[in-house]
Amino acid sequence: MVNKIVKKKSSNSELTSLADKIRQRALERQSAGKTSQHDSDNQESSAAGSRKDGSEDEEQEKKQEQEEEEAEEGPQFESFNQLKLVPELLEACATLNYSKPTPIQAASIPPALEGKDIIGLAQTGSGKTAAFAIPILNQLWHDQQPYYACVMAPTRELAAQIKETFDSLGGAMGVRTTCIVGGMSMIDQARDLMRRPHIIIATPGRLMDHLENTKGFSLRKLRFLVMDEADRLLDMEFGPVLDRILKVIPTHGRTTYLFSATMTSKIDKLQRASLTNPVKCAVSTKYETVETLIQALMVVPGGLKNTFLIYLLNEFLGKTVIVFTRTKANAERISTLCNLLEFSSTALHGDLNQNQRTGALDLFKAGKRAILVATDVAARGLDIPSVDIVINYDIPVDSKSYIHRVGRTARAGRSGKSISLVSQYDLELILRIEDVLGLKLPKESVDKAAIMALRDTVDKANGEVVMEMNRRSKEKALRGKGRNHRGKSRDNMDREEQ
Ligand SMILES: Nc1ncnc2c1ncn2[C@@H]1O[C@H](COP(=O)(O)OP(=O)(O)OP(=O)(O)O)[C@@H](O)[C@H]1O
């Protein structure tokens, strides 16, 4: 029945005048009513008038989590045809093998098509990108205008990936997209912006640079603003630049979507995004990992971390692995150590230039390197379906990072495994993570004799790597003397690392 209606609508669509479309949309909005079951969450922003201290905020967050847990399952759709999308989008979904909407898509696309602001919360790998891209593209089809939507993401690699999703979903309708991120030529980007793209996907620092310095570019007519990994964008580090961007983007007539796997419910932070009566679409609680992910830890005695890691990589030979470190230096060191010991590896961190970063990710995605050693710059959003294992060489300092890191595996219903190496210094961190997850992470069994047999080889190789790195950094310091680093800090805003 619903399918038939959609079909009829689409076959007549070419004949329908703009006025008819607008009227029809208004009618659809009316008939859909204001009965969204999620609307109770709107209280979050309207209650913002009264400021609360930290503990009250925490209380409120907990209460809200409970409510979310108790919330009944959202609407179920067996096919995208039921969502009243334009035929081009339905075709694109079919081409991408999206047979039916994921739960977050089923929950958020209908209110988004009604023109509502959305706060979307769902686990890692659950299809949030398409959840915000589909309603934007659907509207764009009716109303093709340049600078129609801007999607902000915290890292360059994630921005590039979001662009790919828009291109694959919107290709058939001729959507023009551009990626505006740090580390690339401002001039080339200014030229791309002058081609008047429909969708801009950007990291905040570089977007601000263009808003301030690129003649003829403004977002005054922007219709959609998306903050992907919104809790990260709304945090202290991005806050000031975000506020400046928001000042030059219209609030009136703009629809705003915030999406993340770990959304903040702090009212003052959400208010920063100037949402209007947002519908909260939460298909998971605030800190939830997916069921298909097996999580474990290994307690590592002092000085044996490298040996444990190499032991694990040997155990997982043939699998695709991401190793997360806390610092850029560790990412570089471990990747070099892996290669020296003949585990094919590449590093991704903010000390590399953008070509090197893109090159490393491409090698890993193409399967030419089995191991990616990365800082938290790769923790959020990256969708690499082949990843089997995530190893936390260093335990992340906050629980959200843990959730995003381990979420690089077990995506879109696949299975995956994460192992965290826990030294005596990390006990407190891991307890806090377990507490937030509501899980006790089991200990991975190890063959101690095999580990001890590896120790000398690994230590010796590591010694060589450290010497080589010291030599390289001295050389670099000499070369870098007197260089002008002006303007670097904002460009580097997307670095989540030390
Ligand atoms: N309806 C669908 N059916 C099947 N696969 C889908 C569907 N929607 C999205 N996917 C796929 O699911 C994978 C994960 O999607 P996506 O990267 O958007 O997840 P996410 O929720 O944004 O994750 P993260 O929180 O880590 O950023 C992608 O490979 C995407 O192509």
Image (cartoon, rainbow, N blue to C red):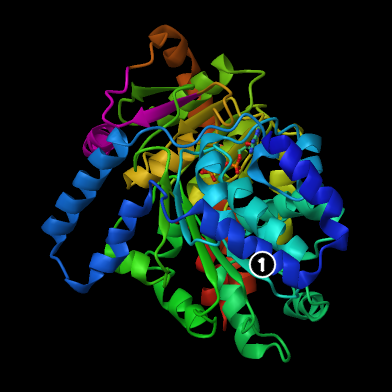
User: Magenta part of the protein: which range?
Assistant: 417-442
Q: Quadrant of the N terminus?
A: top right
Query: Which residue is more in the foreground, 7 or 135?
Result: 7
The residue drawn where x is 38% and y is 48% is: 38
**Residue that numbered label 1 is attached to:** 23
Instruction: Tell me the kind of residue under disc 1.
Output: Arg
Answer yes or no: is residue 470 visible.
yes
Q: Position of residue 464 (x, y in %)?
A: 56, 39
Query: Which residue is more in the foreground, 315 or 88?
Result: 88
> How many other residues sit within 10 Å of disc 1, few (<14), some (14-19) or many (≥20)?
few
Query: Which residue is more in the foreground, 248 or 142?
Result: 142
217 sits left or right of 376 in the view: right
Magenta-span inclusion, residue 76: no
Q: Quadrant of the C terminus?
A: bottom left
Task: Point out the quarter of the image occupied by ligand 1.
Answer: top right
Q: Is residue 151 above or below residue 399?
A: below
